[in-house]
Each structure stands twice: as C-alpha cells, then as structure tokens.
Image (spheres, helix red, strand yellow):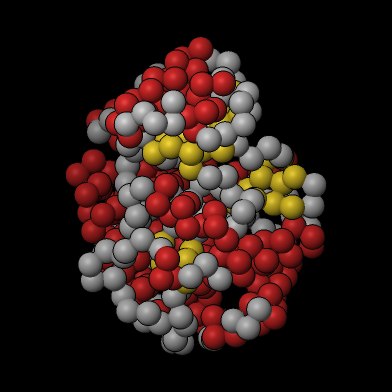
Amino acid sequence: MHRLPHRARKALVHHLVESRRLRGRGEVLTGHHNVNYVRRSGLVLALLLGAVPFTRFKYRVPLRAVEVVPRIWQREAEVLGVVCRYLREVPRCLADLGNGSVHGYRAGRVLSDSGPTGRVGEELMRSFASFFVRTASVPVAELPARPEGWPRDGDTQGFLDWLVHFTERRVHRPNRDRFGALFDAVGVPEDAMARFAAGHRCRAVRPFRLLHTDVHRANVVVRGKRLAVIDWELAILGDPLHDLATHLVRMAYGKEEQGRMVDLWAEAMADAGFTDLTAGLHEDLPVYVAFEYAQSVFPDVMRAAIDLPEDARTEHFRTAADRVERAVRRAREPLRLVDVPDREQVVEALRVWHATAR
C-alpha cells in the first residue's frame, strides 16, 4: 500500500477520513478557523498515515470565516514539519489534503475545560515559559519562506507596522461596507488604527523568532505535569514580545499572575541565553498588549454581530452587547476612543445592524 502513487494515496486518505467523519462517532470541536473531527483510525487508514492502528486522529476542516488574523504560511503542515522536530509533544500533521488536514491526537485535558478564566498556577506558568523558550529555539533558517517585503530581522517597529497595516488593510477596510455603520455606532472610528500608530512605537531591537501567536486555554492540552500547545496555523516570524503579549491577553490572567508570567518568561529567556529577546521588555511589552486590545475590537464586534441568530431575541442582543462593550472598553485607551456608547446604545446598534445589514 505504501507504493501507491502520491495522488492516489492522498485520494484514498481523503475518502477514508471523510467516511469516518460522516459516521459521527467521536468529538466535534469547532473553533474560529476550523472544525476538528476526532475519530479513530482503522487498520488501512493507519497504514496510510504511518500511525498506530485504532488510535485517535484529528481531521481539521477549514471554515469560511471573516479574515481577522494574519497567516503568512498558508499550509500549517509546512510549519509543523519544522516545529515537531523540536517540540516533540506537538501532534504531527499526518496528511495535508489541501481542503483539510489530518493530525495526530494529543490526549489530555484541554485547559479551557476548566473555564475561560481563573488561576493558572505557578507550575503551568513555568511550563509556558519553557514553551516560549523552546519555540524561540527553533532554527529560523528551517522555517518556510516569509512573504515578500517581510520586515528585516530585528526591525521590531517594522514588524509592529506590518501588524497595524494588516489590521487596517485586511480586517478593517474590507469589512467597512458590511460593518462600518456598526463600528461607528459603538464608537470605533474610521481612523482607529491611525490613532493607534500615532501613539505607539517599539523602542528596542530584538531578533525575530518563530511565534505561535495564539497560546490560549483552548489551544493547550495538559497531561500530567506536561503541556502541549496545539494549532499552529497562525504561526509567524517576528518579535517574541508579540507572542508573550497575545498570550497574556488571551489567557485572561488575573493581574497578579500576569505580572508573574512576564517575570517567568524573562527569567527563562535569560537562563537559556536569550537575553537579547528581552531587550526593552518593560517599555515595549505594553505596546504589544495595547495592539492586541486595539486589533481585537474589529473581530470581537464582527463576531458578536454575526453570531446573532436570525430570530434573535432580547437576551441574544444583550449577550452580544456584553461582548462588544468589553472589546470597546479594552480598546478605548490604545485607540483613543472618545464617544463610547452605553450598553443600551450598543444593544440598539446591534438591532439596527441585524435588521438592515445581515
């Protein structure tokens, strides 16, 4: 069977994983970017994948979704091919099918199962610090090619500029026709990202490293005292402080644990000989945290509106308004927002959007 031509092999794998998906025996995990079907492999599929028969695998199928975060490497399999050589706990991509992919399954407790907030604890935070060090140790030369015009190594301000431009040109502007009136109504003006750029700059030079950019509770699997960070589709090359900032915000640490995580990250980097990655930490980390709050206002507002059911009732609009209010409140300072509406105004803005722009 291993002598099958590549195209025939790929077609057979696709047929087998699709048939197992349709049988519906296993978990279905839906995220913002993919639907993940957890299934068990039969003997034939396992042989084709080079896996142990009858073990679980994850079949990832992309969702059609609004583009809100950068993907500089379109094939997650290419990134995992490098990552898995150095972070062996990360599940391998067993087959890249073009319109989906098959991955090994990491057994354990997903950290978000305990809730979206709450204390993480010293032991896990030390494991996160170790993870960031090992990710920074992945040789840059082995990573896939970067897009044309990518900022040069160490140009942290150029990297921040790239992130700001992506948010403006690929997230904000393309969605103005559909969501512009809603953005305006909840207090997010057309020049929001220009306001951010005018008030935020990186000061220190730091070498670029591999970044995961999405290390949050739903992407962390814990088994015993070890953790594995999964879902590498949003990995990029850039300033390590950006990875730390997205982690701090998306993990929803309390204030005390957030400060402790920063200290553990810096200590782990220094112990590994990566002191150059910590240059300007206390001056530039707040810039990336502010950027995370600034850019997330667009996907948070759009998702709150899109997720409203067709027959939305009062409770649906109020729940959506809570999401919008939280996003706007966090973005208020970095985007220099002035006219921020109250909750009832947000509810009304969502009602108008739902009735006219959906």
Compared to 218, does 59 lie above or below?
above
Compared to 120, does 8 lie above or below?
above
Residue at 70 percent across and 81 percent down: it is 271
The quarter of the image holding the C terminus is top left
* Side of 133 where 214 appears, left or right: left
* Side of 220 where 81 appears, left or right: left
Compared to 201, does 61 lie above or below?
above
137 vs 342, nearest the viewer = 137
The quarter of the image holding the N terminus is top left
Residue at 62 percent across and 31 percent down: it is 52
Res 267 visible: yes
* Residue 224 x %, y %: 80, 47
* Residue 193 x %, y %: 31, 65
Compared to 69, does 141 lie above or below?
below
Q: Residue furthest top?
A: 23
* Residue 152 x %, y %: 32, 79
Q: How many marks?
A: 0
* Side of 289 where 179 appears, left or right: left
Residue at 71 percent across and 39 percent down: it is 108
Res 255 visible: no
Q: Quadrant of residue 334?
A: bottom left
233 vs 322, nearest the viewer = 233
Q: Residue furthest front?
A: 3
* Residue 135 x %, y %: 56, 65
Q: Quadrant of residue 105?
A: top right
315 vs 232, nearest the viewer = 232
140 vs 261, nearest the viewer = 140
Residue at 63 percent across and 23 percent down: it is 54
